[in-house]
Amino acid sequence: MAQAKRRRFGVSLREEVAEGLDELSRLLGTSRSNLVEEAVERLLEDYLHYREQHRCSGLFIVYSDAETLDVRKLLEENRDIVVSSSHVHVGGACAEIIVVHGDSERIRRLHNSLESLGCRVRFIPLHGP
């Protein structure tokens, strides 16, 4: 099998991020390059999904340090694209799993709104464009 073409470029990281990358590299027995490549691939998969407007499905994983009624309000305002949601408390924090289906632009706006509340948000597309 032919080796994929590689492209080298420099990246600057905060010291603590670089140290964490080094530690994870040692722990997993792989190179920093492989870890960075995997992280970038996941980021591209999650966000490039929004480039073209289309109907799609996906999951939001939302985490916040404190319960916020603003998340519940956002979900209610977007009930036409929110298929279901599950709210749990984990170690004093709140986690929400949200299943969405609808227009990708609406899903992107919900994503941005959740982040603007200070929540950590991860979107996992279930269907490509």
Image: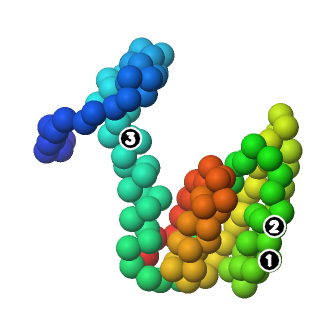
Whole-angstrom CA distance, mark 2 to mark 3, is: 33 Å
Give the mark toward the camera: 3 or 1.
Answer: 1
Tell me which residue sits at (43%, 68%) in the image: 49
Please state the horizontal and vertical placement of residue 64, each as a whole percent of the image.
72, 48
Position above or below: 69 against 57? above
The answer to whether 26 appears left or right of 115 in the picture is left
Q: Are marks 3 and 1 in contact (CB under 8 Å)?
A: no
Q: What element carries label 2?
A: helix
Q: Give the left or right position of residue 79, taking residue 46 as reference.
A: right
| Tag 2 and tag 1, C-beta contact below 8 Å | yes
Label drawn at residue 72: 2
Tell me what residue is drawn at x 70 percent, y 48 percent: 63
Q: Tell me the CA gap for discs 3 and 1.
A: 35 Å
Q: Name the residue under label 3.
A: 38
Residue 56: tell me if it is visible.
no
Q: Which mark is residue 112?
A: none
Q: How crowded is mark 1: few (under 14 residues within 10 Å), some or many (20 or more)?
A: few
Three-letter amino acid code at the position of disc 1? Glu
Question: Which quadrant is home to the C terminus?
Answer: bottom left
Rendered residue at 80%/42% (across/down): 93
Residue 57 in picture, x, y percent from top left = 60, 72
